[in-house]
Amino acid sequence: MLINRQIETDAWSQVDMGLSDVTAIQLTTRHGKIIIANIYNDSIYQQDLRKTIQEMRDRAQRVPTADCTTPMIWIGNFNLHHPLWDKAQNAHLFTRANLKKTQYLINAATDLDLQMALPKGIPSLCTLSTSNYTRPDNVLVSSSLANAVMHCNTMPEEWPMRLDHMAIITQLDTSAEAQPVAPCPNYKLADWKKVRERLAAKLKMLQLGEIIRMEAEFFTPSGQADASNHRCCGLPNPEAQTSAVSEALVVQRAG
């Protein structure tokens, strides 16, 4: 699970589920705390899914009232098929054995007050051998978060070649504490031809024989003002900054 680095580090914490196929975090938002669990379910034994469900039930029982239960978001590959989310064309997957396994997840969703956020009929996987579209992946959210779901859908246009699963994008009307990211010069977008022309004109007025060896010498008040007229500000771009500074350090003050 990847966390956006703009989110404050003290706004989230890892929840140790003790399972190799389940990763979970607790995120603090303006609506309170939310548990996000990324789950991979082995459809044969379902051990991790069963342990996850039991852990979530234990958490719910440890709070004094149901209102204090932390809202949850379950995402991942559950490897389960059911008419509630699969298309009717996949009826061959609705065997008694498969439906029995799926019922365990449905019962848990009912007990934990979870709702399906990804609408029925949206496939999330294409079997490469048969080109058949199915729905083993799912997104479940607590009922208290259901109204906050702004968008939940797959992105087939961003589907990498030779991969069977599609990306699922879920947007919620909530936010976590973000770290302020101050705009900084993005030298890659600068018009360096104009920058050089203006600097060359002013450098001719300086003493001869001096070589700029440090970044601080390059960013003199006058030189910085000239460069500012031809560069753009944006998010940090370490690669672009390094390239520009290296070029600046070899500029010689010519007479």
Image (cartoon, rainbow, N blue to C red):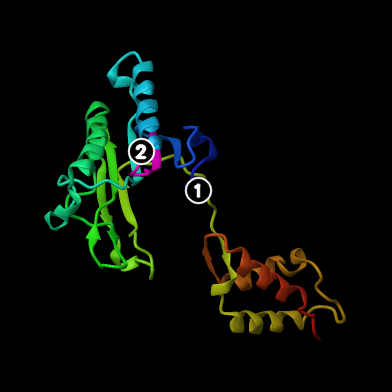
247 relative to 46 in the view: left or right? right
Amino acid at the residue labelled 1: Gln
Image location (x, y in percent) of residue 58:
37, 21
Mark 1 Cα within 10 Å, few/some/many (few <14, many 20+)? few
Image location (x, y in percent) of residue 239:
62, 67
Q: Please name the residue that numbered disc 2 is placed on.
A: 46
Amino acid at the residue labelled 2: Gln
Magenta segment, principal secondary structure? strand
Magenta-tinted stretch: 32-44
Q: Which residue is pictured at 53% across the width and 57% down the height?
A: 183
Check the image and report above or below for 245 versus 93: below
Q: Please name the residue that numbered disc 1 is placed on.
A: 6
Residue that lies at the very extreme toward the right in this rendered image: 209
Q: Which of the 4 quarters of the picture holds residue 9?
A: top right
Mark 2 Cα within 10 Å, few/some/many (few <14, many 20+)? some
Quadrant location of the C terminus in the rendered image: bottom right
Secondary element at image label 1: loop
166 relative to 132 in the view: left or right? right
Q: Which of the 4 quarters of the picture holds residue 66?
A: top left
